[in-house]
Amino acid sequence: MADSNTAPPPGAVPPSLARVAFHAVAAGLTPLIPVPFLDDYALRQVREQSVRDQLKDKGLKAPDKAIAVLAGSYEARSLGGQLVSYLKAVALFPVRKVFRKVFFVLWVKDCVDLTSACLHHGYLLHHALQRGDLDAASLQGDAPRKVQAAIVAACAELDARPINQALRRIFRSSRVLMAEATRAFMDPKQGGARVPDPKSESAEVKSLTDRLLQEMWEERGYFTALERHYDKHLRGAPAPTQAPAATGT
């Protein structure tokens, strides 16, 4: 008899969560981009597009500032944030480039960390929208910052190792190469960066997304606990003012 605990029934994962998984994979591929600064730019674009898509599913459109806040990129886009990011990139790019070529494990860790962060964030934003924590009116005010703070606090509290271990297995067994990531984020017609589209990506990227969805189904108890942490913090429990997304390995 088939094991009902490992195989999700048809339609178990809603299309909106499938898009969350896709954008998480796309975010995880950005460290592979061999062009300085384009990896950070592509990551920001993916995260903001993930927010836009989720809001669009609910018939909502938010100001650019609210999108940036909910994507976790608002502070980074300030003048000071841009300067710090620029200086860090200049200092670290030669080291990262050499070490990523030599140590495969560092490449995997970069991919896992970013995929995990985007997955946790996207999942909780999906949960927040399902609850009605954001609507057309509240998106114009302080609600995006409150929701983002609750997401960050929830992710900081929960041990993400079960998810990160699954992500390491996925990326270690993947055949995605640096050229694959470049194709995913570069527009050959325009000569610039683009946001990956789940309808037109390669079979390998889609395969990574499908495997991630399977892991999400198998770890659904973990995500239920994540929801509870978010709910607690949104109700007013003390939350850290600045904490990393759940990417601990």
Image (spheres, helix red, strand yellow):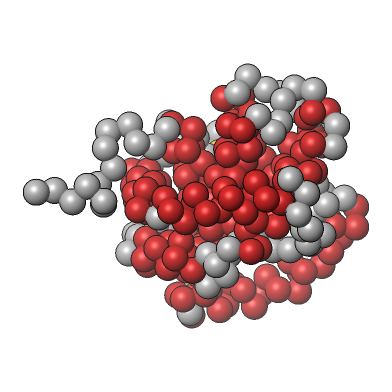
Give the camera-side residue of 146 and 188: 146
Residue at the right extreme?
79
Q: Residue at x 70, y 57 (%)?
A: 153
Does 75 sit above or below residue 13?
below
Whole-percent x, y for residue 63 in the image: 79, 29
**Residue 225 visible (yes or no):** yes
- Counting every numbered tag in the picture gives 0
**Picture quadrant of residue 8:** top left
Q: Quick check: can you spot residue 69?
A: no
Q: Is residue 44 left or right of residue 103?
A: right
174 up-or-down from 9: above or below: below
Question: Which residue: 67% across, 22% down?
Answer: 60
Residue furthest toward the left?
1
Give coordinates of residue 42: x percent, y percent. 63, 48
Residue 87: give x, y in percent of width and height: 82, 67
In front of the other: 36 or 73: 73
Q: Residue at x 63, y 19 (%)?
A: 59
Residue visible at 18% across and 51% down in the picture:
3
Q: Is residue 238 left or right of residue 56?
A: right
Where is residue 211 shown, x and y percent of the image?
34, 51
